[in-house]
C-alpha cells in the first residue's frame, strides 16, 4: 500500500491510498466537523497505466492544483494524485469531484477518481549497435 494526503477543499483533507496488488486507488475525504470519512472515491489505475499483471511496481505523490471550477455543484479538488508505473514509466494524474453543498450538509459523497492526464515519464534509451 502507498498512502499520501492532499487538500480537497477548505478544511477537508483527502487520504489517497493505492493498493499495489490490485491497482485500486482510493481517496477518503475526512469531514473536519465529525472526524469521519465524508467521501469515498475509487478508480483502478491498471488500464490507464497499461500495467501488465504480475509486474506491479508503483510510485505515488500528491500536489496542489487549481483546475477550472465550472458552474456545477461539484468541482475538482484542490489536489491531484500522480501515480507512476515504475516498469513502463507511464504516469497518470487524478483528482476527485467534490460537492461543497453536500459537504456543508454532512451528506456522504462517493464516486470515481477523475483521470486528468496520462504521460510517459521515461524516454527509451538508444544505444549504438
Image (cartoon, rainbow, N blue to C red):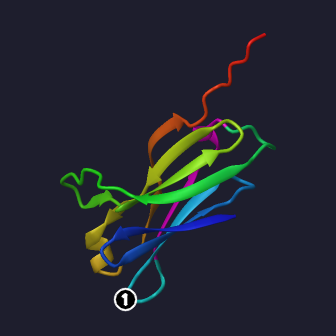
Residue 127, position in %: x, y? 73, 17
Residue 107 seen in the figure? no
Q: Whole-percent x and y of residue 108?
A: 41, 74
> Which quadrant of the structure image shows residue 126?
top right
Q: Measuring 64% from the left and 35% from the top, which residue is drawn there?
A: 50
Residue pushed farthest left? 71
State the residue in front, 44 or 111: 44
User: Would you place residue 101 above or below residue 88 in this image?
Assistant: below
**37 or 63: nearer the eye?**
63
Residue 7 lies, with reference to residue 114, above or below; the image says below
- Image point (42%, 74%), residue name: 13
The magenta-colored residue range is: 38-50
Q: Secondary structure at mark 1?
A: loop
Residue sitting at the far right: 54
Compared across the picture, whether 87 is left or right of 109 comes to right
Q: Quadrant of residue 77?
A: bottom left
Which corner quadrant holds the C terminus?
A: top right
Q: Position of residue 48 (x, y in %)?
A: 57, 39
* Residue 82 seen by the camera: yes
| Residue at numbered disc 1 | 33
Q: Is residue 8 left or right of 48 when viewed as pictured?
A: left
Amino acid at each position: 500500500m502507498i498512502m499520501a494526503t492532499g487538500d480537497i477543499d477548505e478544511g477537508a483533507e483527502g487520504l489517497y491510498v493505492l493498493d499495489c496488488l490490485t491497482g485500486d486507488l482510493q481517496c477518503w475525504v475526512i469531514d473536519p466537523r465529525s472526524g469521519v470519512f465524508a467521501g469515498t472515491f475509487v478508480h483502478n489505475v491498471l488500464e490507464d497505466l497499461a500495467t501488465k499483471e504480475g509486474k506491479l511496481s508503483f510510485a505515488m505523490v500528491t500536489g496542489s492544483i487549481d483546475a477550472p471550477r465550472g458552474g456545477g455543484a461539484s468541482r475538482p479538488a484542490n489536489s491531484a494524485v500522480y501515480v507512476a508505473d515504475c516498469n513502463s514509466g507511464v504516469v497518470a494524474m487524478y483528482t476527485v469531484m467534490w460537492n461543497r453543498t453536500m459537504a456543508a450538509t454532512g451528506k456522504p459523497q462517493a464516486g470515481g477518481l477523475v483521470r486528468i492526464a496520462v504521460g510517459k515519464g521515461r524516454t527509451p534509451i538508444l544505444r549504438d549497435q
